[in-house]
Image: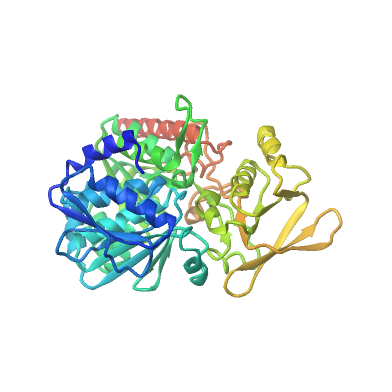
Amino acid sequence: MLDANIQTQLRAYLEKIQHPIELVGTLDGSNKAQEMLALLQDIASLSDKVSVRQDGNSARRPSFSVGRPGEPARISFAGIPVGHEFTSLILALLQTGGHPPKIEASVIAEIRSIPGQFHFETFISLSCHNCPDVVQALNLMAVQNPGISHQMIDGGLFQDEVTERQIMGVPTVFLNGEPFGQGRMTLEEIIGKIDTGALQREAEKVSARAPFDVLIVGGGPAGAAAAIYAARKGIRTGVVSERFGGQVLDTLAIENFISVKETDGPRLAAGLEEHVKEYDVDIINLQRAEALLPDSEGGLTEVRLASGARLRSKTVIIATGARWREMNVPGEKRYRGHGVAYCPHCDGPLFKGKRVAVIGGGNSGVEAAIDLAGVVGQVTLLEFEAILRADAILQKKLFSLPNVKVITQALSTEITGDGQKVNGLLYTDRASGESQRLDIEGVFVQIGLLPNSEWLRDTIALSRHGEIEVDARCETSLPGVFAAGDVTTVPYKQIVIAMGEGSKAALSAFDHLIRRSLS
């Protein structure tokens, strides 16, 4: 099943295995089971420390487990982990075989100390770029703690179970049979949810930090650039973020980042973090800013976090970015994750053969409709204005697709459902004033961005759109507080622009520190 190049690379990885492991298949007579068996046999042929059995007893067929001989396996895959999930398989093999994971010893110790029995199930799609992070985090926890087990489940292979459990978004995680979480989750977030004392301990550690020269709030492209430029000046630099990488983590194809012909969001975010870590930057992740308190004790600005922690700094750069704009119509929140989605690439495979709507006629909406057309049965794109706003080349592709319908001058008014999942969308034809209904099973919302600035509403001057007002030097209405990226009034929300603004904000903050020290 594996081609020669992949086998060569995999053989090199498997040389790092320190202890024997076995792959145990629970198979049936299906073609997928034969593919799975071929994969397992290919892997075993590349290392004398890997063996294969076919006498598994998992409730899901086909599936296979990864474990050590004579011990209960704690990692399993219900599906063939190819595509984005192939890395998850490789890491499971290496870590089960004794190769140490690349995480801090303190985190490993914390995982090992978690008491209780936890069986996780993660429903994924093989095209989902967020799913591997969750799968790999839970697999790692299962390797480190005998009380934790995890199974990855390919939703495309187990469609009946997806329907039965009303799963309409990936990744979806169940813990001991009950819903645990949906969407991207980091290892630290998962630990925090099952280890109830973790958040309090972390908040105490965060608050104990000495004041910074510059504190950057936000870990996206603007925040990362600001951190690099500040750290290169030799000043004490910190970054606090809800998730390092920001919205870039949810972006798939990136083809306009100058000098890089093609990349994707998770890869770019990983590169940003790696670059920042080359410098002496204190990265404080999984912490959401809740308030900005200027002119606190000692002339420092204080940032209060949702965890209760407090950070102080001589200067602050706000780079909290933006998030997907919601429709704010009845039914949207009720059916989020049950037919209402925001990532067509991740969740599209769960709507195979079904009828869906895409809201928004800009580039994002048209690209979403094009992607979905290759998976779903019928796509209806609705745009509020009289014409689409997407690039001409995208519109040409869109109108060439036979299973796509475009409705302009459409005001979406309600998402309807049967109590469990979406079954329709109501909209008003703005030309005629008549109310219309679409019988659909999914709604993909692609209508732009909202700045993450609500926590600053009573502190800093904001535009009527909620963006932080900045001047040419990224200065805000508060001395010593700067802002950069999508959260500001700077036009054109692009990665390359955010990076430039973040760099400029750091230079401005450094200049402010110099002038203050001379005064």
- Taking the spot 59% from the left edge, 69% from the top edge, the residue there is 421
Q: Nearer the viewer, residue 79 or 453?
A: 79
For residue 387, side relative to residue 278 (left or right): right
Q: Residue 127, position in %: x, y?
A: 47, 48
Q: Residue 239, position in %: x, y?
A: 33, 44
Position of 385 relative to 9 (above/below):
below
For residue 24, side relative to residue 326 (left or right): left
Q: Quadrant of residue 315?
A: top left
Q: Residue 9, position in %: x, y?
A: 27, 36
Q: What quarter of the picture does the C terminus occupy?
A: top left
Q: Nearer the viewer, residue 35 or 165?
A: 35
Q: What quarter of the picture does the N terminus occupy?
A: top left
Position of 4 relative to 308 (above/below):
above
Which colour assignment does the render follow? rainbow
For residue 376, side relative to residue 102 (left or right): right
Let me know if residue 48 appears in the view.
Answer: yes
